[in-house]
Image (cartoon, rainbow, N blue to C red):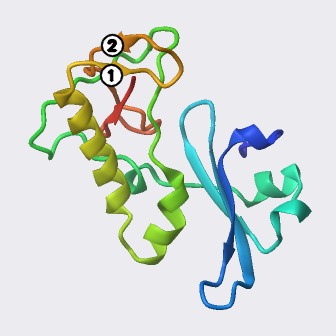
Amino acid sequence: MALQITKWEDLAFFDEEVDDETGQFQHTSFAAFDADDNAYFGKLNQTKSDIIFSQLSTALAPIPDNHLFPEWAPYNVELTKAPDTLPPNTHVKHPNLSTYEMFQEHNVLDLISNGLLEEVKRWRSSPNTLTPTSSTTMAAESVVAASPASSSTATPTR
C-alpha cells in the first residue's frame, strides 16, 4: 500500500523548484518517511498552493535504501547496532532528503549516505549528545540499522 499523506507535517520537505536564471517555476519536490522508516520522494508540475494530499500520495515513489544509508560493514568505523525494538522516546536520525533530487541529478547520491556516516562518527567522538526533543543528554553510542529492508545499513539514533 502506498504511503498516504494526510497532513502537511507528514512531509520531510516540500519545496518549489525554480530556474536559477529566470526565476520561473519548474516543479514542486517533496519527500516523506513512513512508520517503518521507508523513504519516499515525489515531484509534481504544480505550485504548492495548487497541490492536495491525494496528489502527494500518488506521486510519492520509494527511495531505495542504498541511495540513503551507508553499508554496515565496509567502513573502518566501530558501530553499535541498536536492538530491533528501540526504547521509548528514541529518536531515529533520518538522512536529509532535501538534497536527494539534486544529488540524484548529478549522480552523487553516495554523498547522502557518506554524510550520515560522518555524522555518526562525530556523535561517537562527542562525549554527550542532546536529543532533538528534550534537554536530556545521552552517550552518543546508539546506532540503529534503520533500513527497513536490510540490516546492512547503519543510522544513528539520539
**Residue situated in front as seen by the camera: 49 or 33:** 49
Q: Residue 98 carries which label?
A: none
Looking at the image, which residue is at 46% across and 28% down?
A: 92
Numbered disc 1: secondary structure = strand
Numbered disc 2: secondary structure = strand
72 relative position to 76: left or right? right
58 relative position to 138: left or right? right
Please say if 39 is above or below 144.
below
- Asked if the residue under mark 2 is in contact with the one under mark 1, i.e. CB atoms within 8 Å, the reply is yes
21 relative position to 117: left or right? right
Please say if 102 is above or below 64.
below
Location of mark 2 (residue): 138
Looking at the image, which residue is at 45% across and 9% down?
A: 87
Location of mark 1 (residue): 129
Q: Where is residue 158 in the image (x, y as percent from the top left)?
A: 39, 23
Q: Which quarter of the picture shows residue 67?
A: bottom left
Asked whether residue 4 appears in the rendered view, the answer is no
Q: Three-letter amino acid code at disc 2?
A: Met
Please say if 106 is above or below 78.
below
Residue lying at the far bottom in this picture: please name it.
Answer: 22
Q: Which quarter of the picture shows residue 144?
A: top left
Q: Where is residue 97 in the image (x, y as percent from the top left)?
A: 52, 53
Q: Which of marks 1 and 2 is nearer the N terminus?
A: 1
Q: How many labels does the image show?
A: 2
Looking at the image, which residue is at 74% across and 60% down?
A: 59
Q: Position of residue 28 (x, y in %)?
A: 72, 67
Q: In which quarter of the image is the N terminus?
A: top right
**Residue situated in front as seen by the camera: 128 or 92:** 128
Q: Where is residue 14 in the image (x, y as percent from the top left)?
A: 69, 55
Looking at the image, which residue is at 44% across and 68% down?
A: 103
Q: Three-letter amino acid code at disc 1?
A: Thr
